[in-house]
Amino acid sequence: MQIPEKMLAMVLEEQEKPLIVKKVPVPEPNPEQILIRVNACGVCRTDLHIVDGELSEPKLPLIPGHEIVGKVVKVGDNVKNFSVGERVGVPWLGYTDGDCRFCLRDQENLCDNALFTGYTIDGGYAEYTIADHRYCFKIHDSYEDVEAAPLLCAGLIGYRSYRMVKKDMNRIGIYGFGAAAHIIAQIAIYEDKQIYAFTRPDDTKAQEFACSLGAVWAGSSTEPPPEKLDAAIIFAPVGSLVPAALKAIDKGGSVVCGGIHMSDIPSFPYNILWEERVIRSVTNLTRQDGDGLMEIAPKVPVKTEVQTFPLKQANEALDYLRQGKVEGAVVLTMADSSS
């Protein structure tokens, strides 16, 4: 296909301001990069944190978006694992240096010099994007583009959070039943775990959605579960859920905080942490996480619930997410954009 000189993009020029529709040059890949014609890009809560100024160090101007699915249209000289015409997924982790102390101990998600798609490098709210081929994933043929997009962040961060729960822990609470939760719940249930879903008070629609996926219980985050849990994963960016989750888990249990941003955690009595309960956070992802998710997702099979918006309505999509109106995930599509 002929590659145009310019493309449509939604650009963040100033935080706490709406994205701007712009025509910008189509980027040129370096020897380690691929140029991708974007077909779909998920809208993540992290995008909200960037636009709303809660993550304070984005490159500006910035094209957000880090749940990208598209087709390779050009490859750099050193690219061997992707070819023109192949479908590819681009996640949040966009580059690591490979030789800092964290990379050398297999913790590339903590790399001192990491770059992140849609935050410190331009992302997928555009008709084209470039990405380092070493941090991209092949997409299974069973997924349509819009279905695959949420796997690239909601799925990956959710999967890493889920992997932090010990394998012999069977009763798992999930706080905040959105994009990540609805993916990971399916994997956990496939592995014979019992899922307890916690939602906003009176959000019966989300509770019914959780039960339709196989949750054994769903209720308000303000109420205790019917029995003690082995572990809890918190996806909602609400610090007050940490002590609530600690109260809900049994001795030796774990509370995993899966978000990149969370409001302040209030003080809590030591006795709800005592008895070897653990609180831990999850940071970014590794390529190993991606390989693991891409292997298991089609086996389950994970089905993503998506609500789509055209590229030019990215601000409306973000606001939809901001207001908590989402069941599943929000995805931007490029089919009706015009260069």
Image (cartoon, helix red, strand yellow):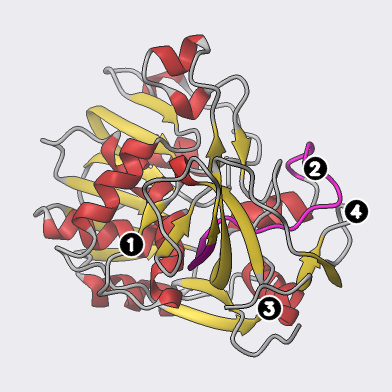
Q: Amino acid at mark 2?
A: Lys
Residues at marks 3 and 1, CA–CA distance in whole angstroms = 24 Å
Residue 109 position in % (x across, y down) = 47, 29
* Residue 221 visible in the current orientation: no
Q: Looking at this view, is 137 or 328 the one in front?
A: 137
Question: Disc 2 or disc 4, which is closer to the eye?
Answer: 2
Q: Amino acid at mark 1?
A: Ile
Quadrant in the picture for residue 36? bottom right
Kindly identify which residue carries mark 4.
14
Residue that appears at 30% across and 50% down:
173
Q: Is residue 230 magenta?
A: no
Q: In the image, which residues are magenta?
A: 54-73
Q: Earlier in the sequence, mark 1 or mark 2?
A: 2
Q: Looking at this view, is 128 or 154 the one in front?
A: 128
Kindly identify which residue carries mark 1.
183
The answer to the question of whether label 2 and label 3 lie on touching residues, with beta carbons closer than 8 A, is no
Does dot 2 land on a helix, a strand or a loop? loop
* Residue 181 visible in the current orientation: yes
Kindly identify which residue carries mark 2.
59
Residue that appears at 16% across and 64% down:
300
